[in-house]
């Protein structure tokens, strides 16, 4: 085998790649959920123009969307690594810095990036809700918390699905960037594999295929969910 | 904030800005033309040609740019036909050239989707009218379809330009020293993480702001007939 396909099989790399792939998916899902929470809060602040806070949110989204993700990851990683190591050592967990820490910092970084994009999606979805619906609910004397729960939130979620789909696709691809700070996800596994066996071509090709499968499968799943929601709303 | 440190970091990061600008310019130049070609292929009635363009864009948009850069930089050098071909080896052997290759191919995929949308929005009647006037296929594209499509696609293409600028930061992972590459080096040398990030981030934000403004101006120029 010219490309070292045999070495990939022989060296047990298939298992390592699958493990890396599942870590990638875990980071992506955790960051997406975190980003969705950030996005919902910040999107509502932006939509409702909550005075001093909306300037902060504007700054946050402008910064994240204008500055490369890699630079943000470096910022979060380098600024926290020393601090966290010191705290962990003080509490007697010297090994913590290697195990869970990379995962946590990866989720924080990717979640912050994903949150900025989610903010824009949520704001757009909220702006797309007809103002008359909210006014009608208010005229009926429904309390504002219930207006949010029964009128705003269900419409917002449905309108936001296509935008959230885009954010999800970007988030999956962004997780590859955290490999540069040492979290052993799919990309990092491919990097280690290619260095060990000296067959970079096959390893990065496999990584590319796994990423492609993840994005295509999730795309199909989202299409299906979207169809389901639309069908139910027709009845 | 350490003024001396900022004075030291600023010239270094400006040196990186030049590399970032060159990387962006070359990738956009190649990527736009490739993307235009792919968009036309995508709308071709030949199933094979349209299918190729579709799969190209699915593959390049479905995988992270970092994987593509690593695959080209570390992977292609392993293949014997790339090693034997002088032109290919020239591209793959150098980090900056390889980054431009990967970025151009990547942005071409996104550009093709944007331009395809623009081309599809051109009213069929206009194309038929041009046909009826006896315009050749090329003239029709140059005079009717392309100007209308680009007008439609320009706002989305502005976003893609910003993404390309952000994408150049990944070149730092294959030894190219541009803004992010220098920033990482400064962060690990001086530990002044926030100061370095602030300067590097400001440079990126300024670059993107200038690009977006240029696109807006071009857009206004192209739609000047609609000016109120």
Image (spheres, coloured by chain):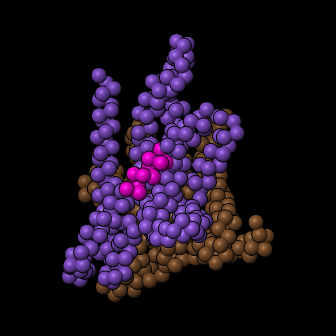
Chain colours: A purple, B brown
Image quadrant occupied by the C terminus of chain A: top left
**B202 on left or right of A139:** right
Q: Is residue B16 above or below residue A120?
A: below
Q: Is residue A119 above or below residue A173?
A: above
- Overall secondary structure of the magenta section: helix
**A18 on left or right of B152:** left
Which residue is found at the position 63% from the left and 72% from the top? B187
Q: Is residue A27 magenta?
A: yes
Q: Is residue B112 visible?
A: no
| Residue A231: x %, y % from top left | 29, 29
Which residue is found at the position 51% from the left and 68% from the top? A92
Q: Between B82 and B8, which is closer to the camera in this rendering?
A: B8
Image quadrant occupied by the N terminus of chain A: bottom left
Which residue is found at the position 52% from the left and 48% from the top? A115
Q: Is residue A87 magenta?
A: no
Q: Which residues are magenta?
A: A26-36
User: Which of the 4 quarters of the picture holds residue A150?
Assistant: top left
Quick one: which residue is furthest to the top in this view?
A140
């Amino acid at each position: 085998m010219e490309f070292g396909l045999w070495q990939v099989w022989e060296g047990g790399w298939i298992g390592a790649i699958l493990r890396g792939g599942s870590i990638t998916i875990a980071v992506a899902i955790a960051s997406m959920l975190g980003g969705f929470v950030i996005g919902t809060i910040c999107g509502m602040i932006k939509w409702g123009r909550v005075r001093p806070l909306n300037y902060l949110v504007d700054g946050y989204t402008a910064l994240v969307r204008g500055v490369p993700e890699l630079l943000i990851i470096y910022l979060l990683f380098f600024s926290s690594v020393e601090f966290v190591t010191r705290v962990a050592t003080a509490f007697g967990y010297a090994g913590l810095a290697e195990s869970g820490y990379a995962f946590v910092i990866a989720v924080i970084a990717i979640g912050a990036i994903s949150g900025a994009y989610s903010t824009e999606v949520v704001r757009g979805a909220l702006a797309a809700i007809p103002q008359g619906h909210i006014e009608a609910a208010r005229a009926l004397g429904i309390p504002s918390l219930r207006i949010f729960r029964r009128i705003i939130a269900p419409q917002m979620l449905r309108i936001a699905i296509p935008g959230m789909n885009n954010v999800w696709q970007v988030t999956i691809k962004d997780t590859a960037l955290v490999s540069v700070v040492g979290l052993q996800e799919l990309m990092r596994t491919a990097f280690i594999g290619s260095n060990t066996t000296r067959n970079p071509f096959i390893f990065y090709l496999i990584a590319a295929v796994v990423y492609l499968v993840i994005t295509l499968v999730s795309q199909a799943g989202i299409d299906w969910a979207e169809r389901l929601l639309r069908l139910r709303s027709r009845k | 904030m350490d003024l001396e440190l900022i004075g030291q970091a600023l010239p270094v990061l400006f040196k990186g800005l030049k590399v970032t600008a060159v990387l962006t310019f070359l990738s956009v130049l190649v990527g736009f033309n490739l993307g235009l070609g792919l968009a036309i292929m995508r709308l071709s009635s030949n199933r094979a040609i349209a299918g190729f363009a579709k799969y190209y864009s699915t593959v390049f948009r479905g995988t992270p740019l970092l994987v593509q850069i690593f695959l080209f930089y570390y992977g292609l050098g392993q293949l014997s036909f790339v090693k034997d071909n002088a032109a290919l080896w020239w591209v793959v052997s150098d980090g900056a050239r390889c980054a431009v290759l990967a970025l151009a191919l990547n942005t071409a995929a996104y550009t093709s989707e944007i331009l395809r949308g623009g081309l599809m929005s051109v009213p069929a009647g206009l194309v038929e009218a041009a046909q009826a006037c006896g315009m050749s296929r090329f003239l029709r594209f140059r005079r009717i379809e392309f100007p209308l499509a680009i007008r439609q696609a320009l706002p989305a293409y502005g976003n893609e330009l910003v993404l390309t600028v952000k994408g150049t930061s990944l070149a730092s992972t294959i030894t190219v020293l541009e803004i992010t590459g220098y920033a990482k080096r400064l962060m690990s040398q001086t530990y002044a993480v926030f100061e370095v990030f602030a300067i590097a981030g400001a440079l990126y934000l300024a670059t993107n702001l200038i690009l977006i403004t240029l696109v807006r101006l071009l857009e206004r120029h192209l739609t000047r007939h609609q000016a109120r």
